[in-house]
Image: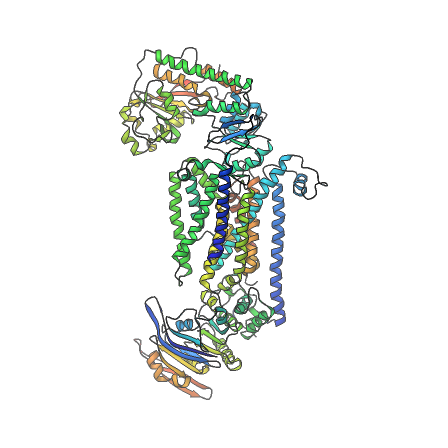
Amino acid sequence: MMNGKIIALAAVAVIVVAGLGTGIWALSNSDNGSDAIQIVDGSGRTITSEEPLSKVFTVGNNSPTAMRLLGLNGSVVGASSTTDSSVAMVQSVLGGQATVWKSSASNLSTETVLMTDADAVICPVKSMTMSADQQTALERAGVLVIRLDCNGDSMFDDLRKLMVLFGDTEEVHAAFDAYNTYYQDVVSAALSAAESSTEEVTGDFMACLVASGWAYNEVSAFGGLIERFGITNVLKGKGFDTSGVGNSYTTDGFREVVDPSDVDYILLRSDKGLDAVYTMITDSSVEYMECESTSAYINDRMYYLHSDICSGAYGCVAYLILYKILFGGEVEGFSEDAVIDHINRLMGTPVIADGTVLCAWYGSSDTSGTVLVTYDAP
Amino acid sequence: MRFEIKGLGQGYGDRTVLEDVSLSAESGEFITVLGPNGSGKSTLIRTICNVMSPRQGSLEIDGRAVGGMDRKELARIVSYVPQTCASFGYTTVFETVLMGRRPYSEWSYSEDDIRKAIDAMKVMSVDGLHDRYVSNLSGGQMQRVFIARSLAQDPEFYLFDEPTSSLDLKFQLESMNIMRSMVKERGSCLIVALHDLNLALRFSDKVLVLKDSHVYDFGPVSEVITPRMIAEVYGVRADIVENERGRYIQPYDYIGTVPCDL
Amino acid sequence: MENNVGGEVSRPGAEELVKVYAGWSRKRLVFLLSMSLGVAVVSVLALCVGAVDVPLADTVSVLFRGLMPGLIAEPSNPHYATIITEMRAPRIVLTVLTGVSLGIAGMVMQGLLRNPLVSPFTLGVSTASSFGAAMSIVFGTALFGTAYYTSFSILGMTFSFSSFSTVMMSFVFGLCSIAIVLFLTRDSNVSRSTVILSGVIISYIFQAGIMFAKYASDDDQLREIALWMMGGLSNVTWSTIVIVLPVVLVCGIYLEKLSSDINVLSSGDDVARNLGIDVRKLRNRGLVFSTLITTVCIAFTGIIGFIGLMAPHICRMLIGNDSRYLLPASALMGAAILLISDTFSRVVMRPEELPVGIIMYIIGGIFFIWLVCGKKLGDRA
């Protein structure tokens, strides 16, 4: 009785062991021509290409944006995104030559990708992205799979990697420099305004990603951004798990560690719009960390920030808004409207639409929320 | 052929059902096993055909231990029909009877197997039902089908557990006649568990009576089936009446709480 | 004259009955041949259809160019060859193999446990495999470190470690389930209900493990687990076929050999023993091999339900219960149902490929309802 089973299992084991042995031996890249382009992508894989890329397929909303900023949108031959509105947005950002399909990344047919004649696919590292099986299938068909988030902390690094992949031409370099310089100018203007301001800004803040129910901790980029303005993250030094960028505030454990009276500022980051945030705050069943006991609520220092301006291509706008919230007033030389308009033009389309609410405040004096900053297109 | 059963002991879990049961059966004998409900008749039949291994005792056919025989070889010698049989949906009568030829075939059935199955169906008058699904038949029809399967198995020893319990009077008599002719004409041996004493009296050569897990008596039918046996084993007082057609049992009293009014 | 419940009509002669039996065998063989032809035709059609429209002329060109290079022109787009030979063909082969495996396994389990409501998953294989896959998805990095995200090559073909670990763990745990069942039912007098009950209990235990993995997962991992459990035949490569095909062939042939004994088992354990069958050995071997054939497929495809339960049922209604014919029939019926469902799932929302279960449960359910209503559950073959 055991014979057949043992033989079958043994056969499988032999295949596996032989494969592992060969694989480990063959793992190193052997094709290293002197002109070969090499980068390490967001998942840690080394990507090698003999020639600069010329045609790519993008997955998600961030890589088309990055390609546009580098002036490489013409090199995108196909794209996929998950919702109708994001498909429309990607279509306009890319400028209309590429076909944009509405599909979830992991269910996208590799046949479709292959038929666009792309050399490579650019997709996010871990979230809403191509599966390992799709990657294997595409690579077997000769299409590289490059995982770059093009968002958040890694945005500028990813832009640099894209430059390298596309041959680091003068035009691309110029486009990158122009954007990078502008972005850094906005950031440094806001920070130096904060430094030279006479306002005394101290205290602890809590920055929350409303939809997910967690607060950004000391290793997060967004938390770090806010700290540059002189206030401290209330999660810092309290022993929270820092393997991820956020810690849940909806658990009893959180409330035991963080004293609401210590929380002087609350920043609520969301892409769901003002009403959704307001509902979440007033809905007691969400257990919104007893915000009514916080110093922030009592002193009217709860703020809503639109997610799009907190990181990514428009991330510099957050600096302007934080300056406004904490120190009051405009940063000299840069207004939110002007900066957003500038980047919208780079995108070729108003990714942030006219009338979008960028910031609002809440507090004990006004529990229905007051809009502070709206984008008014010139 | 001679089937020697010596000192058989059997039980389920902690419960002992049979103790020290011995009998012998030879080709050409019709042996009936009698006993009240729960006396161990079914268990005895199951143990004899080795469907359930005996806990104590030995089973020997012509001197060879049954436990040591190859399964298929034993299947060609001993056939067993339980009191209730299963049939899984959409199996026809023909296919069911044909299964009796399994001990003689490897993977498929030869034409000889098919013809033997047909003969068996004809003997038991189920050939007209050949394409019917067994699970849709009446209890009596099913029992005849299963006996037909046993016939197709062509053994030396038939072990039947209450084969006539679901049959109406006519088919009871017809089946018992067929069984008797199997014994007399083919020279087979039948060991049949029955609850109907009159059928036993009429058709069998020898009778084994079980009481309280032990053998009460074993021997020729006229010696074993006596008013005394009926009183001691069944708790019924009866006369054995004889007329020109044969003998039959007429009960007139019983030991019980409900007053007798026979 | 026969005069009894059920109304027999006539008493046919012996020669007539011999012919009747031969007729049944012939009818069943014809059914098998037509099913085989059907599956072959559907396979070819499935090759032509997908997210990308490959013109028929190009499909023919790709398929036959190797045989007659001089006579057949090149396909109009070089990607068509890759799509058909590297993407669709292995997928169709795995679809057929999976349908075959699940159909066979379902039929064998129903026969061994003498219960028409049993499927290959009744004894806990699906929950155990899902548990293995969930463990790999959620705790892969904890178990294997950064190696989890790497790829490795065998003979020039790349594999991703994460897929490999998911396949291995679901396969190993799937087999564990049957090992546990066999251990729990090692007493020779165990009844069929005990066997089924052990399987159900094992299911619950692994279910707890799956729930824990889901609880500990992040959003992306949770979705990955859910999609795995829905079953899908995406992104199949020839390397998968190299592993699955030999196992399915060997197990399938062995189970066909056992099918004659499984027939006899339908009469009850005691009768089967009396007819010369070693019931315990048959049951154990049958369960092990049908679990093996099931697990080797679902390790790659995820849980694909319905076929194991319904393909044997549908075939039983059409050709009766003789396992020697029912086994290949269930195999072919399973392959046909899965092929049709998979083809629809590739096309209905293209370029998205839906998990195959979504389409299959609808198509299969409707088909079965039609069959039950159309064919009066008859009295005779």
The quadrant of the picture occupied by the N terminus of chain C is bottom right
Where residue A23 appears, x then y in whole percent? Answer: 50, 39
Q: Is residue C168 above or below residue B199?
A: above
- Viewer-proximal residue, B137 or A161? A161
Q: Is residue C126 above or below residue B80?
A: above
Query: Can you name the residue that lies furthest to the bottom here?
Result: B244
Q: Is residue B161 above or below residue C250?
A: below
Query: Can you name the residue that lies furthest to the right here?
Result: C71
Question: Is residue A206 in sight in this rendering?
Answer: yes
Left or right: A67 in relation to B33: right
Image quadrant in which you'd find residue A127: top left
Where residue B225 appears, x then y in whole percent? Answer: 39, 83
Left or right: A5 in relation to C44: left
- Residue sitting at 61 percent across and 56 percent down? C31
- Viewer-proximal residue, A341 or A18? A18
Image quadrant in which you'd find residue C7: bottom right
Where residue C77 appears, x then y in whole percent? Answer: 65, 34
Where residue A229 appears, x then y in whole percent? Answer: 35, 17
Question: Is residue C119 in sight in this rendering?
Answer: no
| Number of numbered discs overlaid on the protein picture | 0
- Viewer-proximal residue, C1 or C146? C146
The quadrant of the picture occupied by the C terminus of chain C is bottom right
Q: Is residue C207 above or below residue B175?
A: above
- Residue sitting at 51 percent across and 80 percent down? B187
Q: Which colour scheme appears in the figure?
A: rainbow
